[in-house]
Amino acid sequence: MGPAKAGRYPEDWVRLRPDATRRTPNVTDQERQKAEELISRLETSVGAIFPRDGGNASLIAGMIQALNGLRSLLGLIRPH
């Protein structure tokens, strides 16, 4: 088997660039505040989706997971 191409598979990213998983975004306080506002608006919109059963349930769950992942990537985790 030949050498893996960079970026082809996630496991290659870590092997080829060990520091890739440790990077944090460099954002200003203003950018962080705007991102927080936009994510909060999206969370409010997701909470307004009705009905919350059937097909919408998996859609809502996926949207919440995606928003939580985005918060995590941007370092915008809110304390509970």
Image: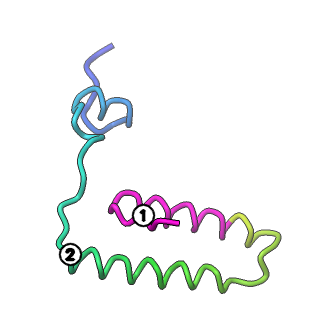
Q: Secondary structure at mark 2?
A: helix
Q: Amino acid at mark 1?
A: Ile
Q: Is residue 30 above or below residue 13?
A: below
Crowd tier of the residue under label 1, counting other residues whose Cα lies within 10 Å: few below 14, some 14–19, many 20 or above: few
Seen in the image, is 69 located left or right of residue 61?
left
Whole-percent x, y for residue 71 in the image: 41, 64
Q: Which mark is residue 67?
A: none
Q: Is residue 36 above or below residue 76?
A: below
Q: Amino acid at mark 2?
A: Asp
Q: Which residue is outermost to the top? A: 1
Q: Earlier in the sequence, mark 2 or mark 1?
A: 2
Q: Secondary structure at mark 1?
A: loop
How far apart, in angstroms, are the residues tagged by discs 2 and 1?
14 Å
In which quadrant of the rendered view does residue 50 lie?
bottom right
Q: Is residue 30 magenta?
A: no
Q: Main secondary structure of the magenta part?
A: helix
For the rendered model, the colour scheme is: rainbow
Q: Which mark is residue 29?
A: 2
Residues in magenta, as a range: 59-80
Residue at 74% across, 68% down:
57
Residue under circle 1? 77
In which quadrant of the rendered view does residue 26 lie?
bottom left
* Front residue (pair 30, 79): 79
